[in-house]
Structures are given as C-alpha cells and as structure tokens.
Image: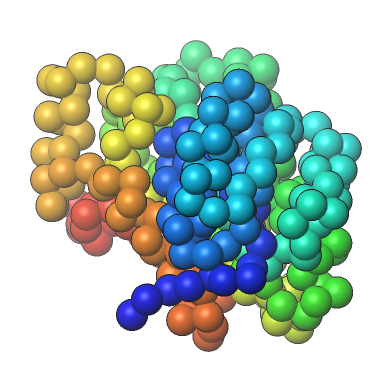
Amino acid sequence: MEIRFDGMTAIVTGAARGQGYVCAEMLVESGAKVAMVDILGDVLTESAKVLSAKGVVKAYTMDITKISEVGATVSKVRQDLGEIDILVQAAGLGPPAPAESITEADWDKVNNINSKGLFFMMQAVTSQSMIPMNRGSIVNFASIAGIKGMRPPLCSAHYSASKGAVVQLTRQGAMEWASHNVRVNAVAPGGVKTEMTMAMVGSPEKMAQVTALVPLKRLSEPHEIASCVLFLASNAASMITGQILSIDGGTSAMGF
C-alpha cells in the first residue's frame, strides 16, 4: 500500500533534526507541502534546504512554549502553504534525572514543551484550519514512558508525566474534535536511535543494558516510527482516532 499526501499541507514540530526531521522527510517524499517548525533556527534552515530538493518545504523558527508565537506561526503557514491537513508533533525534551533531583524549573521546562506547547499547537491548528474545513489528522509523540514505569537510564519523572499528559490530551482531543472529522492519535515509541536518546544513554555499556530489556533486542530506527506516523495521518487510518500506538519492540507487552 502506497501512502500519498499530494495537495495536502502538513506541519511537523521538532523538525530540525531527529525523529521530526525523518517525519518531515517522509511526508514531503509522499507529496505533502511541509512546514518544518523548530526552535533551532540555524539547524532548521539547513534541514529545510536539504528537504527542499524533494518537494515543497518551508522553515518556521518558533518557541513552542511561547503560546503567542504558536498561533501566529500557524497563521503564517496557512498564508504560505494553505490550510493545514496534518499536524505531527515531534517537538520534545527528555533529560534523564533521578526524581529526587528534579527542580521546579526542570519540571516546568519539560512540561511546557512536551505537553503545554503540544496542546496549544493542537488548539491553534484545529481552530484555524481543521474545524473550518471539517477534516484533519493529528499525530502526537507520546512515549512508553507515558504508559508504564521506566528503568534507568531512560527515565525521569518530569518526562514521564509530560508524556502521560500527551496520552490523555490525544484521547481528549479525539473525543472533542470527532464531530468535526478531526482524528487525533499518538505514537508511543520505546527507545529510538536519535541524538537525544544517544545522549541520554551515554555509553555502549548502558546501551547494552537498554537493548537487553527489549524483546526484539534493539532500538527502533527513526524511519520505523515515521512510517507509523504517516499511516495514522493518512486516509488508510480513517477509522482510527484516540489511539496510542506503542512502537517499542514488544517492551510494553512484557508482563514482568
């Protein structure tokens, strides 16, 4: 089955690098016009230049924690690329930390990006484009850390709390916006081979400990996550909403 998004406009947050970049790449390769959004302006500009060889891509530097910027950026994307059919939210922060060491500032930084910013981006896109069009698809990035407890080193209370919030914001959005034919789903990756994960793990020895906990004995590749994102965003998943798809090599299925 080939998934195409010809004539559609997609926003991808956290698109400068890592998982967001791969989602943006696969969307533009599938025919979508892609708005790449990230706070890392210089990296984003270079990433957009690379992907512009594959199709219609525009870069938008934005701080997702500044809610006034969110609505303004969504409005600018609509002016530049047309009404928004797809929103993929890969922007996120996941610093490892023991629960007893997390400060209020640490907590706010992670939750303001991972859950608060994510909600207000959903709100802006649905209210400006999807509800008036009576259609749309949103795919959020949750995590298995938002579903189950995690062993070190891939753990932190503020990250898990923020991703648990993403799970429930996804379900609530699906219920509230179903009457407008807007679908809201999330992927819940386990460990993925991205820069953020590599920095969290820190050493080959710790990586071996992490992969030993995965039934398939490896971390996911970014394209394996992105393929599921594209499926959920597409009309092939037209009857799927409010679902959290775990992509973790079987980790969340373990009973011990």
For the question of whether residue 60 can be seen, the reply is: yes
Q: Where does residue 147 sit, x and y in percent of width and height?
A: 43, 53
Q: Where does residue 27 sit, x and y in percent of width and height?
A: 50, 58
Q: Is residue 159 above or below residue 214?
A: above
Q: Nearer the viewer, residue 167 or 17?
A: 17
Q: Is residue 164 above or below residue 101?
A: below
Q: Is residue 146 left or right of residue 203?
A: right
Number of marks in the image? 0
Q: Residue at the location (35% across, 20% down)?
A: 199
Q: Where does residue 42 sit, x and y in percent of width and height?
A: 60, 21
Q: Residue at the location (78% across, 65% down)?
A: 83
Q: Is residue 202 left or right of residue 17?
A: left
Identify the image quadrant of the N terminus: bottom left
Q: Nearer the viewer, residue 25 or 118?
A: 25
| Quarter residue 180 falls in | bottom right
For the question of whether residue 141 can be seen, the reply is: no
Q: Residue at the location (73% across, 33% down)?
A: 62
Q: Nearer the viewer, residue 93 or 52?
A: 52
